[in-house]
Image (cartoon, rainbow, N blue to C red):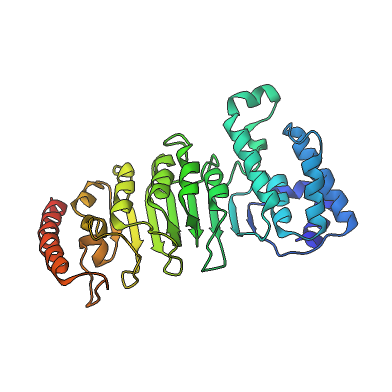
């Protein structure tokens, strides 16, 4: 990133306004000349935003750039390129500057009514034009551990419409962060949570924050089972928030995997049920047999399921399934 971008930025500083898509760079150390250019750019933008008056953050940022940290590099690009529309990045090894940039963006966006007095226009705030975000981790067994810090701010970028997260780890800490936001305050219309581990309250917080969701996709991460995660019923209840706008739902729970659900006394958590018909605008539904009815499509059985409970469950779900089909057809 540094050598090619530094040459371009130092010779043609206005070129930053034409960059619309970025992908996370690799760790590459900068030259002294490039560091000087970057330091001036960082201080110039932060001065215009009336931020970091003591230059402490700027100094730490430049220090990370001198070490070749990709986290500092991608944060720099986000800071100086006002017209970025698409972000594609993975979890950084030491996400110090990127998180601080997101925190600054969140603070400035929350103070929009006061920005006029500070002579800060809406388009001057970094990431104000971002519409699509692709967000991922690379470690299957750990997942994206920083989602609770980055996700809530990203979801509230003013023009964001599409969010895709891969290997996300949305624990209760993330739930607390999302529930702090006002309902309907996020402009996101399409969400894809792929190979992810999300707690029920976290999904509820994410969807409540969205103003009018149109498409939702969730794929269970069978590699990460650190706690009893999202069940089909929790997914449905969260989706009902957008019953009038949701058009496309795709859920893959990998039903052949034991997800450690505590379902023995809560059989209804195994399936979505007839309330699925309350999604009045739904046009496309892609789910497994178990998500739809509670019955596995194949001969598999959950190992802890007792025979007596199995027979009881099937009788109950058979009746519910018939009721579901009747309600759905109407």
**Looking at the image, how many numbered discs can be counted on the residues?**
0
Does residue 303 appear to the left or right of 220 in the view shown? left
Q: Is residue 53 above or below residue 103?
A: above
Residue drawn at point x = 56 percent, y = 63 percent: 137
| Residue 12 makes an appearance in the image | no
Does residue 130 appear to the left or right of 120 in the view shown? left
Looking at the picture, how far across and down is residue 240, in whole percent?
Answer: 30, 45
Quadrant of the rendered image containing residue 26: bottom right
Please tell me which residue lies in front, 26 or 17.
26
Residue drawn at point x = 23 percent, y = 72 percent: 297
Q: Is residue 4 above or below residue 203?
A: below
Looking at the picture, how far across and down is residue 205, in whole percent?
Answer: 42, 44
Looking at the picture, how far across and down is residue 274, in whole percent?
Answer: 18, 52
Residue drawn at point x = 85 percent, y = 49 percent: 37
Q: Give the residue furthest to the top.
A: 117
Residue drawn at point x = 33 percent, y = 54 percent: 248
Quadrant of the rendered image containing residue 245: top left
Q: Give the residue furthest to the bottom.
A: 299
Does residue 151 appear to the left or right of 101 in the view shown? left
Q: Is residue 128 above or below residue 63?
A: above
Q: Where's the N terminus, which quadrant?
A: bottom right
Please tell me which residue lies in front, 295 or 45.
295
Looking at the picture, how far across and down is residue 163, in whole percent?
Answer: 49, 52
């Amino acid at each position: 990133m540094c050598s090619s971008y530094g040459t371009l930025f130092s010779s043609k500083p206005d070129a930053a306004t034409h960059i619309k898509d970025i992908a996370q760079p690799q760790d590459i150390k900068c030259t002294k000349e490039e560091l000087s250019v970057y330091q001036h750019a960082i201080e110039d933008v932060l001065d215009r935003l009336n931020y970091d008056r003591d230059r402490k953050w700027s100094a730490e940022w430049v220090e990370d750039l001198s070490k070749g940290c990709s986290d500092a590099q991608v944060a720099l690009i986000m800071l100086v390129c006002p017209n970025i529309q698409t972000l594609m990045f993975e979890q950084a090894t030491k996400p110090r500057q990127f998180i601080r940039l997101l925190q600054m963006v969140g603070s400035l966006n929350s103070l929009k009514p006061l920005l006029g007095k500070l002579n800060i226009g809406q388009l001057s705030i970094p990431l104000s034009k971002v519409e699509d975000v692709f967000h991922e981790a690379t470690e299957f067994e750990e997942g994206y551990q920083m989602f609770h810090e980055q996700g809530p701010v990203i979801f509230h970028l003013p023009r964001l419409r599409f969010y895709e997260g891969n290997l996300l780890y949305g624990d209760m800490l993330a739930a607390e962060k999302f529930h702090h936001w006002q309902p309907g305050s996020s402009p996101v219309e399409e969400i894809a949570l792929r190979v992810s581990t999300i707690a029920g309250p976290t999904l509820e917080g994410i969807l409540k924050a969205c103003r009018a969701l149109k498409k939702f996709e969730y794929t269970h991460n069978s590699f990460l089972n650190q706690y009893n995660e999202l069940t089909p019923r929790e997914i449905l209840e969260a989706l009902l928030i957008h019953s009038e706008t949701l058009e496309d739902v795709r859920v893959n729970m990998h039903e052949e995997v034991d997800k450690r659900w505590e379902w023995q006394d809560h059989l209804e958590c195994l399936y979505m049920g007839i309330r699925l018909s309350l999604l009045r605008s739904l046009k496309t539904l892609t789910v497994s047999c178990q998500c739809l009815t509670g019955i596995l499509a194949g001969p598999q059985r959950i190992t802890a399921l007792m025979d007596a409970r199995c027979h009881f469950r099937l009788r109950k779900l058979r009746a519910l399934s018939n009721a579901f089909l009747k309600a759905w057809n109407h």
